[in-house]
Image: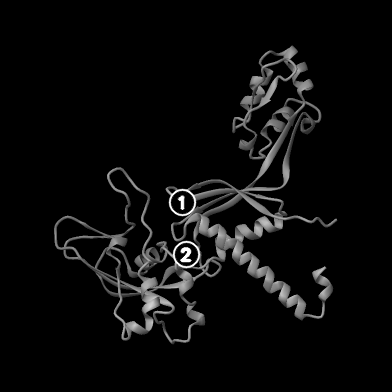
């Protein structure tokens, strides 16, 4: 039976320090929630290093190892929409419209090992005709490597690429291009994008009241079987079990398994674990390439555009009844 639903979201928490956002998606089907989750992981464009040219590398690490590390460095991509996908650009081999170039040139001249970090990535802005690409160049300067979370004494920490000993050199040309994680995970703006259901727990208080008459610590033992501290002893004989943290429930059903192992008939009737229909609690953690709230907004925008494209194709087909 079809339902008329109007999805909406409710913000729970937004923390830019940990780059996370939590929100509730309400009045939505599971297919809608899962589509949004997958789009946030794999369909939102960002920048990542795609081409790496080594001029000189005398470090202990081989070229391919360093290239792999460079490819996985998140790049701040808030202005990624100013650029074209390289496959859609009218150039041949890359231009300021579709790629951003960085250069690493580090020499270790002391006995102390030299760390090569993302702070050593220098924007390479040498263009034949800078005025023709002025808008792209200005946007490109905002694309830079993400810093690690702060530690005591430092607000930000660069990502380590490799370590050089005395006399060793690393000279690398790095080209970043626009892409999506459906092609490669290095373009994903999310380190985590997941949702969980909102649990509803009903306890047969009469059953536990009878058990408490036989064993005074029965509820305490039962509550201890839950790994997430959902239950505790209640304050009255009529309600011997209190559900104190229902949101902590992960649907592991260890409480029901305990009753079943004790030989209790119908354990699922003694503790009923259900979920709020059409409600999903999302947690999205950003790599730093985009702010977490931007990931969610762009995820909805892309999902909306995909649905509009689908509707347009159906309207142009010979099956208009599919829209109803």
SS type, badge 2: helix
Rendered view: 217 above or below 13 = above
Answer few, some or many: residues within 10 Å of disc 1's Cα (few below 14, many 20 plus, some between 14 and 19): many
Say which residue appears at 69% left-offset and 36% top-offset: 253
Secondary structure under the numbered disc 1 in the rendered image? loop
Residue at image point 81% right, 55% down: 3
Q: Nearer the viewer, residue 55 or 182?
A: 182
In the displayed structure, 158 sits above or below 281; it is below
Which circle's residue, 1 or 2, is located before the other in the chain?
1
Q: Residue 54: give x, y in percent of width and height.
A: 30, 74
Q: Label 2 near label 1: C-beta < 8 Å? A: no
Residue pointed to by mark 1? 19
Residue 254 x %, y %: 67, 33
Q: CA distance from mark 1 to mark 2?
A: 17 Å
Q: Which residue is mark 2?
A: 186
Q: Residue 219's spot in the image, x, y percent?
A: 68, 20
Q: Is residue 128 left or right of residue 315?
A: left
Q: Position of residue 248 (x, y in %)?
A: 61, 36
Total marks placed: 2
Q: Which mark is residue 138?
A: none
Residue in the foreground of this view, choosing between 212 and 314: 314
Q: Which corner quadrant holds the N terminus?
A: bottom right
Q: Give the camera-side residue of 126 and 111.
A: 126
Q: Is residue 13 left or right of residue 213?
A: left
Q: Determine whether 22 is above or below 32 in the image.
A: above
Residue 142, picture quadrant:
bottom left
Q: Quadrant of residue 270?
A: top right
> Quick one: which residue is furthest to the left in this view?
110
Within-10-Å neighbours for mark 2: few <14, some 14–19, many 20+:
many
- At a point 81% along the width and 28% down the height, the residue shown is 265
Which of these two is toward me, 161 or 246?
A: 246
């Amino acid at each position: 039976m079809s339902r008329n639903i109007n999805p909406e979201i409710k913000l729970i928490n937004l923390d830019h320090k940990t780059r996370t956002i939590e929100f509730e998606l309400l009045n939505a089907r599971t297919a809608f929630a899962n589509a949004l989750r997958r789009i946030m992981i794999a369909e939102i464009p960002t920048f990542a290093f795609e081409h790496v040219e080594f001029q000189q590398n005398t470090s202990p690490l081989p070229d391919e190892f360093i290239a792999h590390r460079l490819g996985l460095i998140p790049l701040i991509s808030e202005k990624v929409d100013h650029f074209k996908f390289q496959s859609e650009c009218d150039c041949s081999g890359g231009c300021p419209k579709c790629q951003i170039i960085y250069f690493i040139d580090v020499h270790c001249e002391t006995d102390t090992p030299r760390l090569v970090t993302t702070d050593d990535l220098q924007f390479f802005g040498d263009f034949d005709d800078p005025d023709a690409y002025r808008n792209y160049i200005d946007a490109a300067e905002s694309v830079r490597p993400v810093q690690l979370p702060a530690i005591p004494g430092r607000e930000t920490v660069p990502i380590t690429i490799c370590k050089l000993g005395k006399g060793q050199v690393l000279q690398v040309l790095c080209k970043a291009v626009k892409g999506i994680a459906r092609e490669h995970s290095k373009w994903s703006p999310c380190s985590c994008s997941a949702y969980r259901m909102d649990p509803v727990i009903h306890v047969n208080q009469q059953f536990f009241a009878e058990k408490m008459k036989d064993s005074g610590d029965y509820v305490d033992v039962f509550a201890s079987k839950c790994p997430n501290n959902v239950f505790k002893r209640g304050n009255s004989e009529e309600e011997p079990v209190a559900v104190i943290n229902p949101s902590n429930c992960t649907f592991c059903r260890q409480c029901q398994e305990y009753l079943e192992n004790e030989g209790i008939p119908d354990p699922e009737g003694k503790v009923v674990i259900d979920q709020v229909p059409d409600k999903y609690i999302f947690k999205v953690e950003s790599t730093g390439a985009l702010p977490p709230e931007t990931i969610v907004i762009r995820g909805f925008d892309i999902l909306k555009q995909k649905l509009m494209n689908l509707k347009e194709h159906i309207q142009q087909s010979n099956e208009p009844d599919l829209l109803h």
